[in-house]
């Protein structure tokens, strides 16, 4: 049987802290002039980015809050993941798109 090492609120706090570190890491890469390539899924061949000296970042959306904004430009029947991510970029709510 597997034991839970941390209480659930601590796990959520750890995820939030790691997310913050990830955003700061991307900023550091951009400050150093390292290209950053955003990918929507694991099917993206990271070797292409690595071959050009770039770092990769997963652009999965975290909520549906920006879909309505995205649908001002995109069709309503488009994939919700793409609409959410586009909405985060359009509304400047995603640091990865900013960098």
Image (cartoon, rainbow, N blue to C red):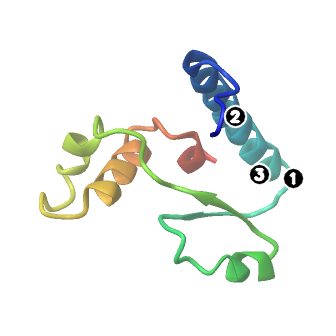
**Alpha carbon separation for disc pair 1 and 3:** 5 Å
Q: Position of residue 46 (x, y in %)?
A: 67, 76
* Mark whose residue sits in front, 3 or 2: 2
SS class, disc 3: helix
Q: Residues within 10 Å of mark 3 (few under 14, many from 20)?
A: some
Looking at the image, is mark 3 or mark 2 earlier in the sequence? 2
**Alpha carbon separation for disc pair 3 and 2:** 18 Å
SS class, disc 1: loop
**Alpha carbon separation for disc pair 1 and 2:** 21 Å
Looking at the image, is mark 1 or mark 2 earlier in the sequence? 2
Q: Are marks 1 and 2 in contact (CB under 8 Å)?
A: no
Residue 21: image quadrant is top right
Q: How many marks?
A: 3
Relative to 76, say whether 13 is above or below.
above
Return the residue nearer the eye: 86 or 18: 18
Relative to 43, say whether 12 is above or below.
above
Q: Residues within 10 Å of mark 2 (few under 14, many from 20)?
A: few
The residue at which mark 3 appears reads as 30
- Checking the image for residue 32, the label placed there is 1
Q: Is residue 58 left or right of residue 90?
A: right
Extreme-front residue of the structure: 1
Relative to 11, say whether 93 is above or below.
below
Return the residue nearer the eye: 92 or 11: 11
Relative to 86, say whether 11 is above or below.
above
Q: Are marks 1 and 3 in contact (CB under 8 Å)?
A: yes
The residue at which mark 2 appears reads as 18
Q: Is residue 78 left or right of residue 34?
A: left
SS class, disc 2: helix
- Checking the image for residue 24, the label placed there is none
Q: Position of residue 9 (x, y in %)?
A: 56, 16
């Amino acid at each position: 049987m597997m034991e839970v090492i941390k209480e659930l609120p601590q796990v959520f706090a750890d995820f939030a802290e790691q997310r913050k570190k990830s955003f700061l890491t991307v900023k550091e890469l951009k400050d150093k002039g390292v290209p950053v390539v955003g990918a929507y899924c694991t099917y993206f061949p990271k070797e292409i980015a690595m071959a050009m000296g770039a770092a990769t970042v997963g652009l999965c959306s975290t909520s549906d809050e920006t879909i309505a904004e995205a649908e001002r430009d995109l069709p309503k029947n488009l994939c919700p993941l793409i609409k959410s991510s586009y909405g985060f970029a359009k509304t400047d709510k995603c640091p990865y798109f900013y960098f």
